[in-house]
Amino acid sequence: MSKIVSVTGNHSASWAARTAIPAVIAAYPITPQTTIVEKIAEFVENGDLKSEYVRVESEHSAMAACIGASALGLRTFTATSSHGLALMHEMLHWAGRARLPVVMPVVNRSLGPPWNIWVDHSDSMAQRDTGWIQFYASNNQEVYDTVLMLFRLCEAPKVLLPGMVALDAYILSHTFTSIEVYDHEEITDFLPSYQAEHWKLDPKDPMATGNIAGPEYYYELSYAVHEGFEAARKMIPKVEADFKKHFGRFHGGFIDTYQCDDAEVIFIAMGTMGEEAQLAVEELRNEGIRAGSARLRVFRPFPAEQIQALANKAKAFVVVDRSLSYGHLGGAVTEIRSALYRGGQTIPVQGVIAGLGGRDVRYTDIKKLIHLGFDAADKGEVKPDIFYGLKR
Amino acid sequence: MNLFEIRFHGRGGQGAVTGAKILGDATRLENKHFQAFAHYGAERRGAPVMAFTRVADETIRIHSYIYDPETIVILDETLLDIPSVQEGMNEDTFVVINTPQAPQEIKLKVKPKISTVDATTIALDVGILVAGIAVVNTIMLGAVARATSIVTIESVKKAIRKGLAELPEKVIETNVEAAQRAYNELQIGY
């Protein structure tokens, strides 16, 4: 039976693994991810989860183990963060291009030096081009639900891609709230067992994989990965609708919009900042200011059409990135401006960098940032991208 | 959003984080929503630590830090002099302190609503010790239930039983009784 448990965001991910029952789980510790695989170890030890729990010697090996297991046609899970994700980078490409539906929570943490263990989206944003579907969660229930949705999405025969759900370090990873969790039997209608129809390694039917493919083949195989993402784009709304039918919750699809229908300025952010923005919007609305919030929940496949639709109604966007591509801008604002240009739209987009390395961003800050959007809308010109809260 | 925010000050090993979580669970029993979290840094046994509980009647969409808590719980009176304890404190703040002193004897920069209880003596009396250190987190929750109206002592006791479920039954009941004793013995200075 479903039940309510008081858990951290990390343990929400562990509970989702317990519910989905991956055949193989690779585990390697890294702050602040460690408690995900630690809790899973406890589940396995107590007999609450029957999975092969593989303790490896590095994150690179964790992903390699997942690739091996997934290639056997098995449901596969691991979790990491920050430098661990960076060390996995090579293997991430391998999982993506081999079309292996590994599911992995990534606890969003900064990269060093200096050592900093707090929230920052730079780790997952840097894996944009590895062939992984990317979701960003804003609360613990969403972490749990998104892991289940990702297994369904990633294992779909037309998709067959790995997927990560990112959760903010400490703000979610180590914060307790109560969430609803299910027994495995309650979710099998929504998430049937994984059947690898496309290809799998089987000693009884030997085949080779990962061989050389020259210029005459490689391009087409890259395009096939792209087609997988386009299939995922079509399937995400269906998976979310089916999830809502079964469990009654909907987290917004590609973009979780709040009060956007008549908004003049729309605030766009990812992760928990995107949810807290709703409070800023509420207060501004009470002051008679027509603001809206659009939390970017899916980053790959990138929801360009949905961004364009929002720009049809709004006068300006304010986009906050909790990461920085040194020498240019934040990852989200770059994609959003690109989508608008392709759509022939010219509304001002105020880019903002904020909250790096765990620097707190409050809804009162978000209110100030939304006001910058009104400045841009009124004057039709955008200030250079802002480093909000930077002490110089 | 109508929020009620509590900040715990303790020393590493006193169970501030567990206390914040059990308080959250207690409010959950009264159909409230909660977050419980710690201020993570370089924790080590004996160092000053902070933990927080945020409570609301609806789903909590705020994720930033707590700056102006309605209630400040001080698990160790030797922390009274460190600056972070008095941050965000004003005349309306409930300040619940583990000390043998009466509320009138506590001197702070502002005059908040102080209440006091000698939780360490209670812990030593009933034997709530971990590695020789008196653990006062559950005891202080009894005091919080009396000092504020955020939660009832009945819910606190239920949440203690749930939160400590992995411990022996006798230890759990000792904690529950000690929380009730703190509730009864709390001196209220407002």
Image (tube, coloured by chain):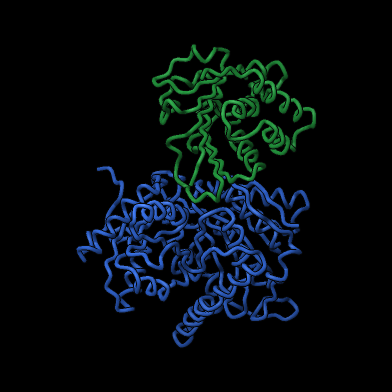
Chain colours: A blue, B green
Q: Is residue A118 left or right of residue A3?
A: left
Q: Is residue B132 left or right of residue A253?
A: right
Q: Position of residue A343 (x, y in %)?
A: 33, 78
Residue drawn where x is 47% and y is 72% of the image:
A301
Q: Position of residue A382 (x, y in %)?
A: 23, 62
Total number of numbered discs in the rendering:
0
Q: Looking at the rendering, in which quadrant would you find the C terminus of chain A?
A: top left
Q: Is residue A284 left or right of residue B176?
A: left
The image quadrant that residue A198 belongs to is bottom right
Picture layout, residue B108 above or below residue A134:
above
Q: Looking at the rendering, in which quadrant would you find the N terminus of chain A?
A: bottom right
Q: Position of residue A378 (x, y in %)?
A: 22, 63
Picture layout, residue B8 above or below residue A74:
above
Residue drawn where x is 47% and y is 48% of the image:
B62
Q: Is residue A320 left or right of residue A235?
A: left
Q: Position of residue A184 (x, y in %)?
A: 74, 62
Asked whether B45 or A179 is in front, the reply is A179
Asked whether A32 or A165 is in front, the reply is A165
Asked whether B33 or B174 is in front, the reply is B33
Residue drawn where x is 61% and y is 25% of the image:
B143
Residue drawn where x is 74% and y is 37% of the image:
B165
The image quadrant that residue B174 belongs to is top right
